[in-house]
């Protein structure tokens, strides 16, 4: 059995400030290549690690690009919701998003937590599961979302949109280390969210991989030097193997990213680092993400869980209302 994996496509209707090209057109060409490779290799399905869209309520023409891609693909498409696909990064808003709509009309399959999809071929069975983004995913109590238990097939693939890393990162960012989830029963764990990605890592005979975002939107040196890629997954009697497939339609970072902004960005990062340091020293917060600050306040004040959940719901609702106002303001 063969599968093709991509992640973090961030479909949008305009070009990010750091891009010098026509970003939507560039992404269309990349997706045409994905379609061609999927058909040439006769994969069973295409898998997506989340953040299909840049925002949860993209313009109609942006959704049209995705619909055309899915129809041209002509193969099953499985995805987990990313934080950008949701209002207020709240999974409870999924049914009000464009990703949720595409799932409702059957153009793609959204993997629900705990759901198992089975494939069988040549005497081998494989189960596919997924975990979309949610507030607590990269916390000790939310880490269960990375773990596959009670495997019901010969092989198991698990997709997660979370900050899975192979080494410690900044304290201001919530993350999970591969070593924290090495007891998973998944033979292969696929992740997104962290745009730089990492090469295949094997722990306890289990494989973990993140090919990085299919698009590049920052001018960080590592991003400029990174080449967008897909992952070919082959599952058989000898287990699961993976292979990176660099995109032929991608161009060198220097040709599509505004390198001149790198110095300006570095200065902004230095200023931001000072602000973060000041906030942490005065407020003792480890993160500046609103949901993480709410979590820490709730822990410090020993607030009931339902209070924090209600606050997060109201933030998501406020984002939905602002999105509606933006639509209403369009002439």
Image: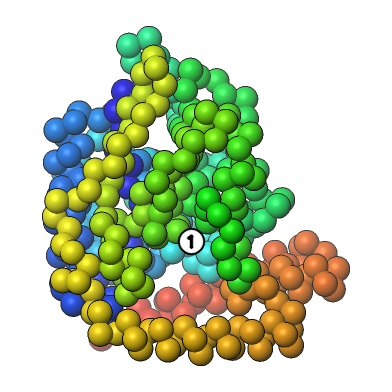
In this rendered view, identify the residue nearer to me: 44 or 275.
Answer: 275
138 lies left or right of 207: right
Image quadrant occupied by the N terminus = top left
* Residue lying at the far right of the rendered structure: 302
Q: Residue at x 42, y 76 (%)?
A: 324
Q: Is residue 232 above or below residue 134?
A: above
Q: Residue at x 36, y 49 (%)?
A: 211
Q: Residue at x 67, y 86 (%)?
A: 279
Q: Position of residue 125 (x, y in %)?
A: 43, 17
* Residue lying at the far top of the rendered structure: 123
Q: Position of residue 69 (x, y in %)?
A: 20, 49
Q: Residue at x 53, y 69 (%)?
A: 88
131 lies left or right of 215: right
In this rendered view, identify the residue nearer to me: 286 or 56.
Answer: 286
Q: Quadrant of residue 120?
A: top left
Q: For numbered disc 1, what is the local secondary structure?
A: helix
Regarding residue 108, the answer to whether it shows in the image is no
Residue bearing mark 1: 83
Image quadrant occupied by the C terminus = bottom left
Q: Is residue 323 above or below residue 228?
A: below
Regarding residue 41, the answer to whether it shows in the image is yes
């Amino acid at each position: 059995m063969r599968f093709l994996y991509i992640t973090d496509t961030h479909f949008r209707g305009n070009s990010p400030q750091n891009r010098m090209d026509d970003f939507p057109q560039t992404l269309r060409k990349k997706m045409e290549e994905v379609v061609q490779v999927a058909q040439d290799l006769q994969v069973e399905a295409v898998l997506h690690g989340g953040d299909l869209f840049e925002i949860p309520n993209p313009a109609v023409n942006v959704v049209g690009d995705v619909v055309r891609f899915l129809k041209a693909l002509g193969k099953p498409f499985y995805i987990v919701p990313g934080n950008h696909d949701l209002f207020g990064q709240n999974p409870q808003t999924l049914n009000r998003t464009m990703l949720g709509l595409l799932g409702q009309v059957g153009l793609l399959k959204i993997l629900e937590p705990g759901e198992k999809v089975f494939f069988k071929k040549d005497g081998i069975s494989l189960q596919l599961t997924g975990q979309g983004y949610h507030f607590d995913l990269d916390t000790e109590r939310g880490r269960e979302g990375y773990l596959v238990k009670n495997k019901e097939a010969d092989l198991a693939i698990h997709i997660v949109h979370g900050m899975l890393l192979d080494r410690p990162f900044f304290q201001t960012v919530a993350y999970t280390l591969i070593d924290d989830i090495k007891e998973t029963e998944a033979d292969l764990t696929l992740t997104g969210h962290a745009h730089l990605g990492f090469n295949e890592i094997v722990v306890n005979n289990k494989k973990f991989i993140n090919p990085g975002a299919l698009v590049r939107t920052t001018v960080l040196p590592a991003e400029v030097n990174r080449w967008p890629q897909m992952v070919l997954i082959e599952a058989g009697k000898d287990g699961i193997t993976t292979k990176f497939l660099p995109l032929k339609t991608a161009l060198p970072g220097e040709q599509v990213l505004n390198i001149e902004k790198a110095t300006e960005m570095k200065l902004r990062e230095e200023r931001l680092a000072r602000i973060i340091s000041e906030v942490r020293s005065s407020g003792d917060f480890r993160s500046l993400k609103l949901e993480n600050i709410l979590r820490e306040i709730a822990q410090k004040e020993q607030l009931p869980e339902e209070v924090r959940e209600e606050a997060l719901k109201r933030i998501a609702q406020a984002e939905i209302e602002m999105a509606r106002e933006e639509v209403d303001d369009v002439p």
